[in-house]
Image (cartoon, helix red, strand yellow):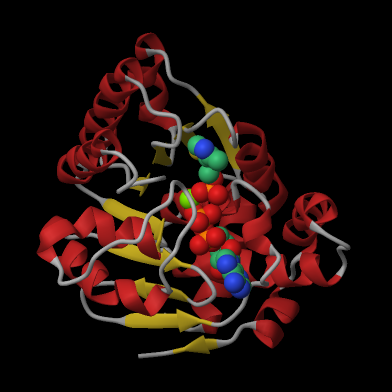
Amino acid sequence: MNTQTIVTALSAVREQKPLVLNITNYVVMNNTANGLLAMGASPIMAHSRAELAEMMAFSGALVINIGTLDSVWIERMMFAVEQANQHGKPVVLDPVGCGASSLRTETSRRIAEAAEQLIIRGNASEIIALAGTGANAEANSKGVDALDASEAAVEAARYLVRYYRCSVVISGKIDIIVTDNSEFRLHNGHSMMPFVTGMGCTLSALTGAFAAVGETTGLAAAAVLGVAGEIAAEQSQGPGSLQLNLLDALYRLDAETLMQRLRMEQP
Ligand SMILES: Nc1ncnc2c1ncn2[C@@H]1O[C@H](COP(=O)(O)OP(=O)(O)O)[C@@H](O)[C@H]1O
Ligand SMILES: Cc1ncsc1CCOP(=O)(O)O
Ligand SMILES: [Mg+2]
């Protein structure tokens, strides 16, 4: 993966407009659907068991976000993952608030265990909590926001990559993308981004769009959101306008700007 492959993946999303099936939380349904549309993909939010099998057959990827979990949704999430496996589709897991309750931690692990083509995208505290005793770190969790720096979660991410045979994106001030044979660090984004709810969820949704066109590491999504987020923040007075400006920046992002602004440390 290099800058050119990221640019090519963005063109592929815009050309193919992949359908991304989201089972996501009540807080961010609108943000994430708009984020996918602005970048050029096609979102659908669904959670009825009666339609998930049918829809998974023609969707390009499944995004499971556990943000507002309950017992009914857990069963749907497991069913959707089964369908994604059956149709050979990638699954993105956003373990929102993993570590804040045992329900979230256990459910995240069940989903990760079940998915055959998996990308995990979480903040540092969630990644550390998901790895649990598998990695040598203690998560500092206070709900859905990270209290740990991305670097503190690298060992945990490496453990998850080996254990679940997946890719892991640790988001934060630095985004770190860990795969079985590489690690990338992205220094884009803006300190205003964590003041808008659903930024991480948007990253997970965009990760689904890229996975649907064959970019299954999470790197391209992190690059695109990082660059669009910093452009949007430069034009915003605060989180209110950032939320709107982000959609404009995703929509307007071109290859030249992406290449110029991307600050990527390659392995
Ligand atoms: N301090 C920061 N500086 C720059 N970018 C950030 C910062 N914090 C978060 N981001 C960006 O915000 C997006 C969401 O990441 P994050 O806040 O870690 O997710 P979550 O909302 O799940 O906690 C990512 O694109 C990340 O790069
Ligand atoms: C605040 C909140 N509570 C449950 S889900 C959610 C949204 C979290 O979104 P993100 O992790 O992208 O900030
Ligand atoms: Mg999150």
Q: For residue 191, what is the image quadrant?
A: bottom right
Left or right? Give the position of 45 relative to 99: right
Residue 220, how many percent across, how many down? 51, 68
Please report the residue visible at 46 percent of the width from the left and 60 percent of the height from the top: 146
Please report the residue visible at 68 percent of the width from the left and 52 percent of the height from the top: 196
Q: Is residue 205 above or below residue 135?
A: above
Please report the residue visible at 55 percent of the width from the left and 81 percent of the height from the top: 4
Residue 39, how many percent across, how many down? 67, 53
Q: Is residue 217 visible?
A: no
Q: Quadrant of the C terminus?
A: bottom left
Q: For residue 14, what is the image quadrant?
A: bottom right
Left or right? Give the position of 239 relative to 179: right
Q: For residue 125, what is the image quadrant?
A: bottom left
Residue 256, how many percent across, how many down? 73, 80
Left or right? Give the position of 31 relative to 105: right
Q: How many marks?
A: 0
Q: Quadrant of the N terminus?
A: bottom left
Q: Is residue 176 visible?
A: yes
Q: Is residue 10 above or below residue 68?
A: below
Residue 68, how many percent across, how many down? 45, 30
* Foreground pick, 128 / 231: 128
* Foreground pick, 113 / 83: 113
